[in-house]
Image (tube, helix red, strand yellow):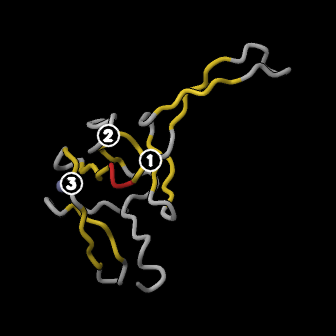
Amino acid sequence: MPLGVKNKMKIKKDDVVVVIAGADKGKKGRVIEAIPAEERVIVEKVNIVKRHQRPTPQQRQGGIIEREAKFAASNVAIFCSKCDKAVRIGAKILEDGTKVRICRKCGEMLDD
Ligand SMILES: [Zn+2]
């Protein structure tokens, strides 16, 4: 396999996605971070982990911090606002040569 072909993750930062597998199945959220090298994503309010924070001189209380953890990008699908559901995405080349992602169902362009 030629270099550069492998990590072809379709999910990008700021995409709205729906979780299609795992404990958070059905949840919808915005992609905070996309990590193509690992084919993982961090999605707003999805895959929340609790971390115990030790008290520090600055913050005496310590306590539990909740934050999103990264997980496999294959567990999410792009949400199409026009179809109002998770959809498969396709690609389209515009007249000026720009490649954009489209909803395979309704053809709605998913990139600006
Ligand atoms: Zn659509």
Neighbour tally class for label 3: few under 14, some 14-19, many 20 plus, Cα within 10 Å = some
Q: Position of residue 106 (x, y in %)?
A: 14, 59
> What residue appears at the point 35 percent right and 47 percent down from the top-left corner?
16
Q: Secondary structure at mark 2?
A: loop
Asked if disc 3 is less than 8 Å from ligand 1, the answer is yes
Badge 2 or badge 1: first in the primary sequence: 2
- For the residues labelled 2 and 3, the Cα–Cα distance comes to 18 Å
Q: Is residue 44 left or right of residue 19?
A: right
- For residue 87, the mark is 3
Find the residue positioned furthest to the right: 57
Earlier along the polypeptide chain: callout 2 or callout 3? 2
SS state under label 1: strand
Q: Residue at x 55, y 27 (%)?
A: 50
The kind of residue on which mark 3 rests is Val
56 relative to 73, above or below? above
Q: Which residue is mark 1?
A: 71
The answer to the question of whether label 3 and label 1 lie on touching residues, with beta carbons closer than 8 A, is no
- Ligand 1: give its quadrant: bottom left
On the image, the x and y values in percent for residue 67 come to 54, 33
Q: Position of residue 92 (x, y in %)?
A: 26, 75
The image quarter in which residue 57 lies: top right
